Amino acid sequence: MKIGVIGAGAVGGYFGALLAEAGEDVTFLVREGRYQALQHGLTVKSVHGDLFLAKPKLARSGEELIGCEVVLIAVKQYHLEGVWNDLRTLAEGGAVLLPLLNGVRHMERLERDFGATRVLGGSCHIETTLDETGAVVQTSDIRDIVYGALGDEGSVDPLTESVLDRLQEAFLRAHIPAVRRVHILRELWKKYVFLCAFSGMTAATRSTIGIIWREHSTRLALAQMFGELIAVAQANGIDLQETFHAAMMERVAGLNPLMTSSMHRDLEKGRPLELDSLQGDLIAMAEEREVDAPIHRTIYAVLAPHRHGRR
């Protein structure tokens, strides 16, 4: 399958490398600095096994990816605007776009600008980062993808159905745990609920999840954050089960106590934060639906001075 990957960082580099290693025709669209760095190859260090692509296929513009059947969008939310024209070029050229982004509100714009037949819903659960050499480092067992068509069951057009089938086969060949879902927007919200609370709390406290869980006050605040997120989801028509809040707390309790978030790591490294597309969007949606979100407002205020990275 001919696959484009926009971004060869922690997420795009990891999944793209696995797909390429499995024999898929993968091309990475990257910025100039990453383009030069990858001339020496793409290294992945993973608990599931290391790999090295000596000569990854690289591109500097969307035009070079025309002909790809599917394009994975794997950039940070604050870089999405910078690749929007490339996405338009690829969608108009026949590609189906699969965003693996944090957050939920980007889906509204993608569908509005490119149409439901050119956009899939998708998200990933993975703990990865780039080390000082530019290698992708994947540090936990979690590396899941959920994806699916935006339409209801039975309303998916034949082109999208064909792409979904071939994409599923590609994921299987690459040994990527990927699950196709019918109600994909609900799945995106499930991830968003977890990630928004998890990232905000770990970054604001500068702590691992184990420290947060042991401290009664932070554990209570985390539970309140889940409550705020679930209330906003339901106000937006997302049907989450009554047991979902308890499931989120149980999930956190079972995490490796040393686990933290990419937002926390970005904060420590002085990089920009995905604050506006996570906690910021939650606050905006809460205001639109008249839902109270005091803990998220506080988390946002604590992190806002750092959202553009170290100056």
Image: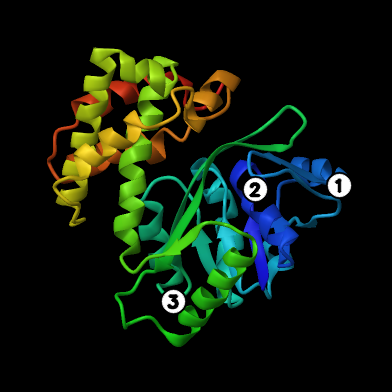
Q: Disc 3 to disc 1, how far (Cα)?
A: 35 Å
Q: Disc 1 or 2, which lies upstream in sequence? A: 2
Q: Looking at the image, can residue 89 be seen?
A: no
> Counting other residues with Cα less than 10 Å from the Cα at mark 1, is it few (<14), some (14-19), or many (20 or more)?
few
Q: Quadrant of the N terminus?
A: bottom right
Residue drawn at x 42%, y 72% is: 115
Kind of element beneath mark 2: helix
Q: Disc 1 to disc 2, how far (Cα)?
A: 17 Å
User: Hey, what amino acid is under mark 2?
Assistant: Tyr
Rendered image coloring scheme: rainbow
Q: Looking at the image, can residue 97 be seen?
A: yes
Kind of element beneath mark 1: helix
Kind of element beneath mark 3: loop
Q: What residue did someone put label 1 on? A: 39
Q: What residue did someone put label 2 on? A: 14
Task: Give the quarter of the image for residue 272.
Answer: top right
User: Hey, what amino acid is under mark 1?
Assistant: Gln
Q: Disc 3 or 1, which lies upstream in sequence? A: 1
180 versus 94 height, above or below? above
Residue drawn at x 55%, y 27% is: 266
The picture places residue 194, in percent across and down from the top left corner, at: 34, 39
The picture places residue 153, in percent across and down from the top left corner, at: 30, 77
> Counting other residues with Cα less than 10 Å from the Cα at mark 2, is it few (<14), some (14-19), or many (20 or more)?
many
The picture places residue 73, in percent across and down from the top left corner, at: 56, 56
